[in-house]
Amino acid sequence: MASSLHAVPGGSTETLEILVIDDTPAAPEAIRDALSAEGACVRAVASAQQALDEIRRRAAHVAIVNMDAPCALGGMGAATLESLHRDCPDVQTLALTNQRQADICLSAWRAGAGDLLFFPADAAALRQLVTAARQRLARQQQVAHRNERLRDMCRRLSKSRQEISRQVDVLCQDLVKGYQTLAEQLQHSQEHLEFSQTLRGDLNIESLLRKTMSYLLNKLGAVNAVVFLPGTDNVFLLGAYLRHDTESDEALIAGIRDTLVRQVTTREEQLHLENDAQARDAFAHDFGMLTGRCWSATALRAPEADDRECMGALVMFRNQDRPLTVADRQTAAGVSDILAAQLAKVIRIHHRGDLTMEDLGDAPESFEQNDDSFPES
């Protein structure tokens, strides 16, 4: 029979493919004649396995199973329907029978038949059943398409949810870090305000240095600290020395002055030997005392001065088993700025040209942690 294109409900345009499972030619021929006007392509096979093979080779829209054919005796018709319903869910199935017993009808429906066709049937009834099957197929395809769209939407929503969850986690982490940073800044601001109030109004350099060492001891605990102030001929002299685990060693002081102080007074930022290879190598070469210690040096520069002239240097160090933390260095930087500003005020008042380290006395102040003038750390 010549096939033609036929519009299938649901929007697609294709030939309606009908597969008849019957081992006799009578039913396939009758169905082919009845549906010739519909432009359907009717094929026939003799068994369930042949039907599956044929569908794999060439798709079918509707399968009609003759429940009364010899191959269907002993319940094989229902088995064929079950096989098609299980392995070919996109194929609409019709049960063809000339028996009107209830058990036959129930067996066909339970096996997955979409409808029953009683044989012999007129062409109009057959066309009506095939049209209904075709409409069910279109609805099934629409449902499958909608379900696929919903699954795709769910996948995209799930992916978006995961991305939003990740972004929220990152935002929360950033907020936590921001609050921590803000809390640290507030703490340092409070500490700097406290130290600034401690030095306010004090115009005695020896008193300023003693208060500075006391503040460092209270805030940082076990630490060695040295303050150098400028003398004549651009030579820095020892102003104060807080000892924790070192002896009063002139060679140590000279090494710090000739290496760390010389380098830190030429830069704006703090100097950390563990992060500055050039300074570390120079210090190790010139003095050889780097091993086992953590060092940090800060130039004393008055913040309000236009030229940021160096007022001296603050050097801190201790054993590497308890290294200087970022908070320790921030404290040292704040102390350096406040001390430098107060020193600049003292120098302005006492006329810098007439005041040098030699005016302070024969020897600089040296403080130890067991000094009664210091609170215990």
Image (cartoon, rainbow, N blue to C red):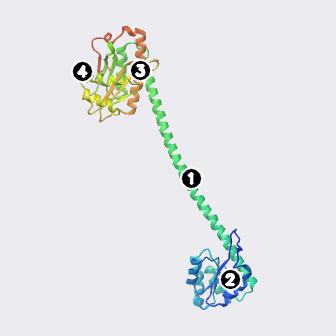
* Label disc, if present, on residue 66 of the rendered structure: none
* Label disc, if present, on residue 250 of the rendered structure: 4
**In percent of the image, x 58 and y 58: which residue is there?**
154
Cα separation between marks 2 and 1: 48 Å
**In percent of the image, x 69 and y 79: which residue is there?**
3
Q: Which residue is mark 1?
A: 160
Q: Nearer the viewer, residue 172 or 91?
A: 91
Residue sitting farthest toward the right: 124
Amino acid at circle 4: Glu
Under circle 3, the secondary element is: strand
Under circle 2, the secondary element is: strand
Q: Nearer the viewer, residue 131 or 14?
A: 14
The first of marks 2 and 1 along the sequence is 2
The first of marks 2 and 4 along the sequence is 2
Q: Nearer the viewer, residue 346 or 222?
A: 346
**In percent of the image, x 65 and y 90: which residue is there?**
25
* Label disc, if present, on residue 301 of the rendered structure: 3
Residue 249 visible? The answer is no
The first of marks 1 and 3 along the sequence is 1
- Mark 2 or 3, which is nearer the eye? 3
Cα separation between marks 3 and 4: 26 Å
Under circle 4, the secondary element is: helix
Which picture quadrant has residue 259? Answer: top left
Q: Which residue is mark 2?
A: 116
Tell me the quadrant of the picture where the N terminus can be found.
bottom right
> Counting other residues with Cα less than 10 Å from the Cα at mark 2, is it few (<14), some (14-19), or many (20 or more)?
some
Cα separation between marks 1 and 3: 53 Å
Q: Residue 27: percent from the left, percent from the top?
A: 67, 88
Q: Are marks 3 and 4 in contact (CB under 8 Å)?
A: no
Q: Residue 47: percent from the left, percent from the top?
A: 58, 86
Q: Residue 365: percent from the left, percent from the top?
A: 30, 17
> Counting other residues with Cα less than 10 Å from the Cα at mark 3, is it few (<14), some (14-19), or many (20 or more)?
many
